[in-house]
Image (cartoon, grey):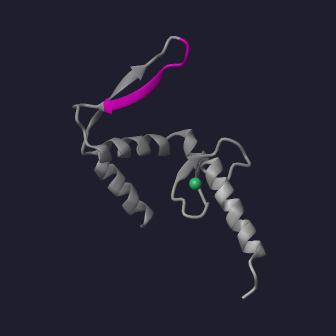
Amino acid sequence: MPWREAVRLLNEAAAHTPTVRFLDWPEDTAPVVRQRPVRSGDDLTAALAHAVIALLASPDRDRLRACHAPRCVRYFRKEHPRQEWCTPRCGNRARVARHHQRHKAPA
Ligand SMILES: [Zn+2]
């Protein structure tokens, strides 16, 4: 899917549930601007679209990675430079697949 089309669909999904900004300021941390749906019972697609928009517009976007483990379709936020998979389980599966690839008999 072309990039512009994906952004258009994301914005369209988010528009199904308008949100309002509010200040979240816990006592011992810095204040954060958050958003919540104007009305309750919003649809899940719109809620997910709002979360994706917030993530893509944040500095965390640069740490977003696709997991390349076999059969995994997840994305994850890279927490350290050597992290390559979304979970340790995916890391194990990828290592096993790599080992199997190296040691399988030549055809
Ligand atoms: Zn994974």
Pick the residue in front: 92 or 62: 92
> As displayed, is residue 100 above or below residue 61?
below
Estimate the x, y position of residue 85 in percent, counting from the top left.
64, 53
The quadrant holding residue 19 is top left
Estimate the x, y position of residue 65 in percent, counting from the top left.
59, 52
Residue drawn at (72%, 67%) of the image? 98
The quadrant holding residue 77 is top right
Residue drawn at (30%, 50%) of the image? 13
User: Outermost residue, front direction?
Assistant: 105
Q: Quadrant of the C terminus?
A: bottom right
User: Outermost residue, top direction?
Assistant: 27
Q: Is residue 68 visible?
A: yes
Q: Is residue 19 left or right of residue 77?
A: left
Q: Is residue 102 left or right of residue 88?
A: right
Q: Is residue 5 magenta?
A: no
Q: Quadrant of the N terminus?
A: bottom left
Start and end of the magenta stretch? 28-36
Q: Quadrant of ligand 1?
A: bottom right
Estimate the x, y position of residue 36 in percent, counting from the top left.
33, 30
User: Outermost residue, bottom direction?
Assistant: 107
Q: Is residue 32 magenta?
A: yes
Residue drawn at (56%, 48%) of the image? 76
The quadrant holding residue 50 is top left
Q: Is residue 5 left or right of residue 92?
A: left
Pick the residue in front: 72 or 75: 72
Pick the residue in front: 32 or 75: 75
Estimate the x, y position of residue 12 in percent, counting from the top left.
29, 52
> As displayed, is residue 107 above or below residue 92?
below
Residue drawn at (41%, 41%) of the image? 51
Q: Is residue 66 visible?
A: no
Q: How many labels were placed on the picture?
A: 0
